[in-house]
Amino acid sequence: MPEKNNPPSLEENDLPQVVNLSGVQVENVEAELVRVDQSAIGSISNAEEVDMHQSGSMQVSASRVTMQNSFTGNIHAEEITLQDSTALGIQARQASIDGRAGLLIARDNVVVNPGARTGILVGRNVQTQGTRTLLLMAGKVEGPVEGLMDTRRILLSSVIAGIMAGVILLLGRFLFRRK
């Protein structure tokens, strides 16, 4: 009886050490060191270091991430550096931001460079040289921070959102009730 030739499986120890990508679209990349230039990547995972230049990705998971003129949806890393880049969600131990971040959660230190913008910034120690943020939660803040909404505006927005949600639910109840 002939034996079937099964393709060899990659074990974790068999992952490539270095992957260099330029001008390509790739769904998933797993390697110790990933360098990406002008490419679109779905997911980068299990990497020690990721360096992205003029590229985009949906998700990055690595020990160290450096991005220049790039975009990503979600980053999970120990250390991250964003230079003229945008990230929707960041979870890191240490972060240095010179760009835009939607949600940034850092366990230790966050350095926000001049002109950087964040939606929600959470960190133990935040060092800023002039930034704008919607919501800041930090144990210690060094430097100027411009809040886009003060307490009064946040309270007013919350009340209006609550009233609108109540009206929508009430209308839905009247329109779709069973007879």
Image (cartoon, grey):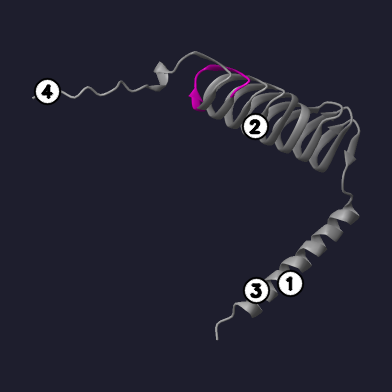
Amino acid at pointer 1: Val
Q: Mark 3: which secondary structure?
A: helix
Q: Earlier in the sequence, mark 3 or mark 4?
A: 4
Which part of the image, by quadrant, shows the C terminus?
bottom right
Asked if residue 6 is among those painted magenta in the image, a careful observer would answer no
Marks 3 and 4, how far apart in space? 65 Å
Mark 1 residue crowding within 10 angstroms, few (<14) / some (14–19) / many (20+) = few
Residue most extreme to the left: 1
Mark number for residue 167? 1
Marks 3 and 2, how far apart in space? 37 Å
Q: Mark 2: which secondary structure?
A: strand
| 140 in relation to 150, above or below | above
Q: Earlier in the sequence, mark 2 or mark 4?
A: 4
Left or right placement of residue 90 versus residue 16 in this view: right
Q: Position of residue 158 (x, y in %)?
A: 80, 60
Marks 1 and 3, how far apart in space? 8 Å
Mark number for residue 2? 4
Bounds of the magenta span?
A: 27-39
Asked if residue 34 is among those painted magenta in the image, a careful observer would answer yes
Q: Earlier in the sequence, mark 4 or mark 1?
A: 4
Amino acid at pointer 2: Thr
| 8 in relation to 102, above or below | above
Q: Main secondary structure of the magenta part?
A: strand
Is the C-beta separation of discs 3 and 4 under 8 Å? Answer: no
Q: Earlier in the sequence, mark 2 or mark 1?
A: 2
Amino acid at pointer 3: Gly
Q: Which residue is mark 3?
A: 172
Location of residue 109 (image quadrant): top right
Q: Position of residue 29 (x, y in %)?
A: 50, 24
Q: Which residue is mark 2?
A: 72
Q: Residue at x 75, y 39 (%)?
A: 122
Q: Position of residue 123 (x, y in %)?
A: 75, 35
